[in-house]
Image (cartoon, grey):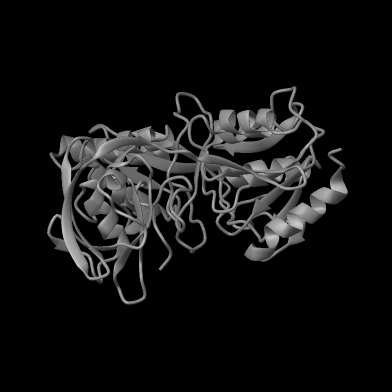
Amino acid sequence: MSGRDPLCSPRRVRRGPALTLVFAGVLVTGAATGAFPGPGAPQRRAVAAPADPAGPAVRPEAVREAAAEAMAAGKSPTEAAERAVSRSGDRWAAVYSEGEYAEFQDALDGRYTRVGLWARQEPDGRIEVTRVRPGSPAADAGIRAGDRLRSVDGHRTDGRPVTEVIALLRGATPGDGTADAPAGTTVTLGLERGTRAWTRTLRRARLSTDPVTVRRLSGGVTVVKVSAFTKGSAGAVRAALRAAPADGRTVLDLRGNSGGLVTEAVATASAFLDGGLVATYDVDGAQRALHADPGGDTARPLVVLVDGGTMSAAELLTGALQDRGRAVVIGSRTFGKGSVQMPVKLPDGSVAELTVGHYRTPSGRTVDGRGITPDLEARPEQALPRARTVLTGLGDPS
């Protein structure tokens, strides 16, 4: 099983059989996000990742009406909305409780209440810590990568799906969609390292994500890795470019980036484009457009790395840079999530996210269900070396 990051919350799509939702790009496997501007719509979105073709969209009015009728009858508006969404066949639709949606907004703002460790399930069913965030409660407790996580609050973890382990670490009941426990609450972990077994009680803390990381390579190459388009990620990309040599070569690594705030993706495009079209999209048949701000760096040699985990807002950015001739795209075909969701608030405070349209790249390409084909195919271990070779041909940093 692929590794999962307990700093990010799995979500449940309430439609027919339960499906796991994940936030923008922080889990290794999972879903895409993408929010588009619209009248009164917040810039945030979460989605599921089923493989079945997209079904017909459900009308917001129908969901509101079903929820209102349920409330008037003394029944659950949320459950009524779930049924309406399930019947629609909209594979990207989701229904959130008020608490879940508030937490989701925090997540896209880059804030989480967690203990600060990553974990994965080994082939034998054991849960192993793969990474510990510096300065987090887990780090302060002396937990290290490679430690075995044996239990969480008395619940044995061996053989348990890693999504359930994550829910326990968050303080939520596995599978019930409840919000996380607040900062300051405690969680007791059973741990094992070699022959040593011990328990530690950690206090959950408010943590922030760092979706943009930068590293310098020889030859004047700067690699800017964007793992998610959370609030402030575009500003971090611009800061990385300012700190890099003005005539240096740049790799924008969007592998595993499953989306986030479209406003941040467009602002990132503005760092590399001098205005112009980034994408078009439709909302209930009405055509709209997203444009880059003028003044971006159009001279810096640029390669974009993508893979099957590049989704939604990350695909929107990739398509814009590719169509505008601004970057060479290297890697493998992207995921293919190009639908537009809008939030609908229900009478009990819950929120339904419903598909209302699709976006296209500047040249008019449809992304949904198709993805973006890179200019050069490359296996994961080949992508960065090939990017460096291509950058050598794109410009001389001297």
Q: Residue furthest front?
A: 195
In the image, taking residue 281 as reference, residue 145 lies left or right, namely left
Residue depicted at 16% across the width and 43% down the height: 186
Q: Nearer the viewer, residue 12 or 198?
A: 198
In the image, taking residue 91 as reference, residue 153 lies left or right, namely left
Q: Residue furthest bottom?
A: 124
Residue depicted at 43% across the width and 38% down the height: 209
Q: Nearer the viewer, residue 49 or 274?
A: 274
For the C terminus, the quadrant is top right
Residue depicted at 54% across the width and 37% down the height: 284
User: How many numbered marks are there?
Assistant: 0
Q: Position of residue 259 (x, y in %)?
A: 53, 44
In the image, taking residue 254 as reference, residue 175 lies left or right, namely left
Q: Nearer the viewer, residue 64 or 112?
A: 112
Q: Is residue 150 above or below residue 392?
A: below
Q: Position of residue 286 (x, y in %)?
A: 60, 33
Q: Is residue 386 visible?
A: yes
Q: Quadrant of residue 147?
A: bottom left
Q: Is residue 365 visible?
A: no
In the image, taking residue 25 as reference, residue 244 lies left or right, namely right
Q: Is residue 191 above or below residue 132?
A: below
Q: Quadrant of residue 149?
A: bottom left
Q: Nearer the viewer, residue 265 or 19?
A: 265
Q: Position of residue 329 (x, y in %)?
A: 73, 51
Q: Is residue 83 above or below residue 66?
A: below
Q: Is residue 333 above or below residue 230?
A: below
Q: Position of residue 322 (x, y in %)?
A: 75, 45
Residue depicted at 15% across the width and 61% down the height: 155
For the N terminus, the quadrant is bottom left
